[in-house]
Image (cartoon, rainbow, N blue to C red):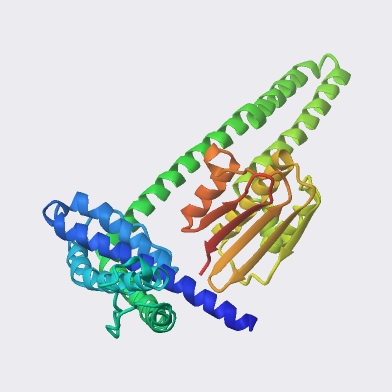
Amino acid sequence: MHRVIGEARARSVETGRGGRYLLDTLMTAAVSLVAAPLLCVPSLAAPWAERQRRRAGALLGRPVEPRPRASRRDLAWLVTQVVLGLPAGAFALLCLGNLLLTLVVTVGWWAFPAEDPPGLLLSGARVDGWGPALTLNLAQFLLLAVLAAVVLPPLARLHARCCLAVLAPSPADRLAARVSELTRTRTDVLQAHGAELRRIERDLHDGTQARLVAIAMRLAVAGETLPRDPDAAGALVRQAQAETEEAMTELRSVIRTIYPPVLADQGLAGALGTLGPRAGVPTRIDVGELGEVPAAVEVVVYFAVTEALANIARHSRAAKAAVRVARDGATLSARITDDGAGGADAARGSGLDGIRRRAAALDGTMKISSPPGGPTVITVELPCA
């Protein structure tokens, strides 16, 4: 019984969605017909067509690809909308309107003049008492309801598919969008590369180079002091040795930011495994079977996980975090989660934006789900074919 009720409710919801879509289509088709001279201008037709595209995509449950510009397809859609939308919408209006009229006649037949009682649409019989109102009207209502449930949803889906087919981006539009995306990601990569070079130069100039200059000065002083005071010269040499070791440590830290040696030594799975103990919050690292991964993808995944865990330790107030890296065919995905305060946003110019730009440089994506109060989920997907 519950199953039957659930199916009936689902069917009524689907009928309602299809009916609303078709009624809106009727309105859109009528406006398109009346305002055809204005809508022949591509810049005016594009937003009108885009509205219908999004409605059609929502009805079918399909994501709608963004269109980079107006095109001749918008004008073709106007013709299709008038030719197909008017009759489809008119049928939905006739069906749903008579359903409503049947209900009105059923409960209010007595309000009509006695000499002109209302008639039924299908049989033509006059309703002049509660008997016909509760029998004939009920039969007509059920028949119209079944007709609406059977016809309106598939009719709405058929129109939505036609709409999406007509308004789908052309190969030229797809190429233009792809070129635009590649231009944007190339700009991001160049900017990130320039910033990285400036950071490396600054680290070498302010750190390693300064220490090497100090070492050279100490050794020069030691050379001059050696004939007069060998003990003092020996102390200067020992200080220079200690500073040499510190300079080598700083140089290794700079090299790690270019290509972490742990990747070359242990591979991606091993390198990720070393991040858990030094993440700042208790972190579970789970790495699936990755197969052969390009070096550039390894670097981006390692950087993304490292940066995300650093953000969690600094900003999230999380009690625990988890990292899951897996491969599905030609796509490598890294999913970083925490139970912190949420509110993470790459648009604020944080390290998350650096993750996004690095992923985009390899034609990958980064998605963030971080509602206030948490949890935060960062998903990075990269092609690695």
How many numbered markers are drawn? Answer: 0
Say if residue 60 shows up in the picture: no
Name which residue lies at 48% across and 71% down: 13
Foreground pick, 228 / 171: 171
Foreground pick, 47 / 369: 47
Q: Is residue 42 left or right of residue 171?
A: left
Say if residue 212 shows up in the picture: yes
Residue 160 spot, x, y in % from top left? 33, 70
Q: Is residue 2 left or right of residue 193?
A: right
Name which residue lies at 26% across and 65% down: 26
Q: Quadrant of residue 174?
A: bottom left
Residue 81 spot, x, y in % from top left? 22, 66
Name which residue lies at 33% across and 73% down: 98
Name which residue lies at 59% across and 42% down: 351
Instruction: Tell me if residue 217 comes above or below residue 344 in the rendering.
Output: above
Foreground pick, 121 / 259: 121
Q: Is residue 70 left or right of residue 308?
A: left
Considering every residue shown, the one lying at the far left of the view is 37
* Quadrant (top left, top right, bottom left, bottom right) of the N terminus: bottom right
Considering every residue shown, the one lying at the far front of the view is 114
Residue 378 spot, x, y in % from top left? 62, 54
Considering every residue shown, the one lying at the far right of the view is 231
Q: Quadrant of residue 267?
A: bottom right
Residue 322 spot, x, y in % from top left? 73, 57
Q: Quadrant of residue 225?
A: top right
Q: Is residue 315 left or right of residue 152?
A: right
